[in-house]
Image (cartoon, rainbow, N blue to C red):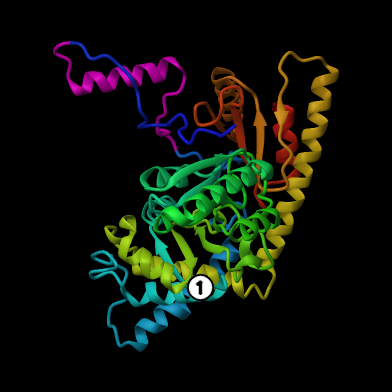
Amino acid sequence: MDLPFSTPLEAGGLFTSSLGAGDIPLNHLKKLLDKRKEDGLLRALPNFHAFTPQSIDFFSNDYLGVAQNNQILALIQEKLEKNYFENNLKSNKNVLHYGGATGSRLISGNIPEAIQAEKYIATFHNAENSLIFSTGYSANVGLLACLATENDYYVSDQLIHASMIDGVRLSNAQKLRFRHNDMAHLETHLQNIQKNKTKNLEKNPEKIGFTYILIESIYSMDGDVAPLSEIYALAEKYDAYLIIDEAHALAVYGEKGEGFAHKYAQNSHTFARIYTFGKGFGSHGAVIVGSDILISYLINFARSFIYSTALLPSHYAYIEATYAVLNEDFLGILEKERQKLNENIAFFQEKAHYFLEKNQKNNLEKNYQILPSNTAIQTLIIGGNMETKAVETHLRNKNFLVKAILSPTVPQGTERLRLCLHSFNTFEQIESFFEEL
């Protein structure tokens, strides 16, 4: 059975409502917000800074602690000074360029720092070229919205990022989804596409398009890993091309933190890889790596790139400096952080197993479920929006920074706490989390 591509939308989604005579837009919006509040789904920005000396971070994406590790930050600063400040001095600039880019990359924003950073990134990821976007969201939406025509197919895992889903929706592609990491379901779609192409080959050869498989290497809600070798085998068998979102893998996985898809960089079925800097880098922005032709195409057709102001010059330099530290980790500092993270993941799963066994022996009414995961993302399924929010509130009051993920963001009945483990978490913090739970 095919999965429908449309899913329950989050904030800003589609609603049905009847408007009364004389109603005004703000009243209509208030009704929709009131309904969200009634359902326990109303979002609001926190009115406090989450991080305090007492808080225990189990919700940020700073997996290796790059954003707060003084030793790593000092290395980045050292690279930044060498690559950015020295270059400014060599250029006889009296004032270092700290300000904004003053325009899009196609107007005034194509500054040397951006060009240099993209060259470094392309080399690091073993690609011909790369293009930096302001966010991971704009990278995914920009790529997918402009790439496919009505003759092409997007075949996507049902758990891909919301940004990929939105990019697919904006495209003209024919859209199919396969059950999460279900290779048999993926192959069924690819077989049907192949049959359709064979039928059209004689009648409408100009309508024979391309097939793109859309996946994440690590999935952000379940914390599991895509079976890349199996997916590549299917791509080669059915002549499909992969677009891989490596947001949660950069800096954390691979020999130098280059992610899971790096070993497939030169595979002819690798079409594009997307890396986000707001997670393992503890920074901001994203990059798409691929062929020279792809990057040129994006510069011409990706609206989220064309119509966005460039990043700060200092930020491009900071991104390059972070990559340089990743690439030249001579002291093994980041490698030690990865090792600590892996130790914490193993310890968490061990304690989770004990916790679930204890619950079963005590015949507790609530049956929690903890998904198996060997990544930094750990999932505690509670079930029910109200119950999950209640657990989140209790833990927050005990200084555990956790985040409840509610339906419709996840399917009803699988409402959960999404926990992010870090290299800087301690065994004691993990133990105390389960004791409090």
Q: Is residue 311 magenta?
A: no
Horizontal and vertical percent for residue 15? 35, 23
Question: Which quadrant of the rendered structure holds the C terminus?
Answer: top right
Residue at 49 percent across and 54 percent down: it is 278
Residue pushed farthest left?
Answer: 22
Q: Quadrant of residue 132?
A: bottom left
Q: Which residue is mark 1?
A: 122
Residue at 27 percent across and 64 percent down: it is 104
Q: Is residue 205 above or below residue 199?
A: below
User: Which range of residues does the magenta coloring cover?
Assistant: 21-48
Q: Callout 1, which amino acid?
A: Ala
Q: In front: 10, or 26?
A: 10
Q: Residues within 10 Å of mark 1 (few under 14, many from 20)?
A: some
Horizontal and vertical percent for residue 197? 51, 52
Question: Which quadrant of the rendered structure holds the N terminus?
Answer: top right
Q: Is residue 272 above or below residue 403?
A: below
